[in-house]
């Protein structure tokens, strides 16, 4: 009978979904009860991980998860996190996460949140948000103003009557001129 199915399949056009359904049926129909049980557990674990990724994948909280393990005997999800603060936060969010996972079609009896061992590194692809931040360019060297530039500043702010405002404006203008001089001298090098 198997030979007839293979011959019939070779002579017809099938979609990939139909072919996969055929292959799945063939595997399941020839599996032992123990193999069927393992397949059921694997399928259930896949559903749990898929729901977790739909709910927490790409979130601020999800970025601190270092590992997951479905515990089928307890119908719980063991979640490892990279810090005690995140373990505490996820513990507080557990009912919200459970409700959202139920909306994705997975009903769990609960979660077990644990902190990963110190120094444990998350495996897999780094998220762009977690990539190393680029170094800021070094600020230009401090270049003090000449006495003539100081006098020009005093003349520029002299018409302002309020002494506090005059002093604040002079300080801001002086810092701006010193920065400009420093960046111009750095560009010449």
Image (spheres, rainbow, N blue to C red):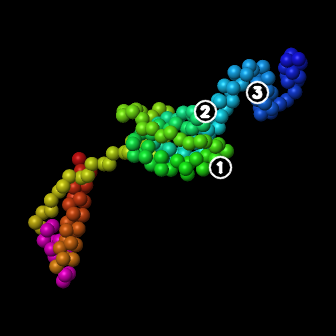
Vertical arrangement, residue 4 with respect to residue 55, above or below: above
The circle on residue 24 is 3
Q: Residue furthest bottom?
A: 161
Vertical arrangement, residue 67 with respect to residue 168, above or below: above
Q: Confirm whether residue 126 shows in the render.
A: no
Depth check: 35 or 11 in front?
A: 35
Mark toward the start of the polypeptide (1 vs 2): 2
Q: Residue furthest left?
A: 147
Residue 152 colored magenta?
yes
Residue 130 colored magenta?
no
- Give SS at disc 2: loop
Residue shown at 25%/55% (left/top)? 183
The circle on residue 103 is 1
Depth check: 47 or 5 in front?
A: 47
Spot occupied by residue 58 in the image (x, y as percentages of width and height):
53, 46
- Give SS at disc 1: helix
Residue shown at 49%/35% (left/top)? 67
Range shown magenta:
149-162
């Amino acid at each position: 009978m198997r030979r007839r199915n293979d011959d019939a399949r070779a002579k017809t056009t099938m979609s990939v979904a139909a072919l996969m359904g055929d292959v799945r049926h063939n595997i399941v129909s020839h599996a032992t009860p123990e193999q069927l049980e393992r397949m059921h557990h694997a399928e259930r674990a896949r559903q749990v991980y898929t729901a977790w990724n739909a709910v927490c994948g790409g979130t601020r909280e999800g970025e601190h998860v270092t590992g997951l393990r479905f515990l089928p005997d307890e119908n719980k999800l063991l979640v490892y996190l990279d810090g005690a603060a995140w373990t505490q936060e996820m513990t507080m969010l557990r009912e919200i996460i459970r409700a959202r996972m139920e909306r994705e079609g997975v009903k769990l009896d609960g979660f077990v949140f644990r902190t990963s061992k110190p120094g444990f590194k998350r495996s897999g692809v780094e998220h762009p948000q977690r990539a190393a931040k680029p170094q800021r360019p070094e600020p230009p060297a401090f270049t003090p103003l000449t006495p003539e530039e100081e006098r020009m500043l005093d003349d520029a702010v002299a018409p302002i009557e309020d002494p506090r405002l005059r002093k604040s404006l002079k300080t801001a203008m002086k810092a701006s001129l010193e920065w400009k001089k420093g960046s111009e001298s750095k560009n010449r090098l």
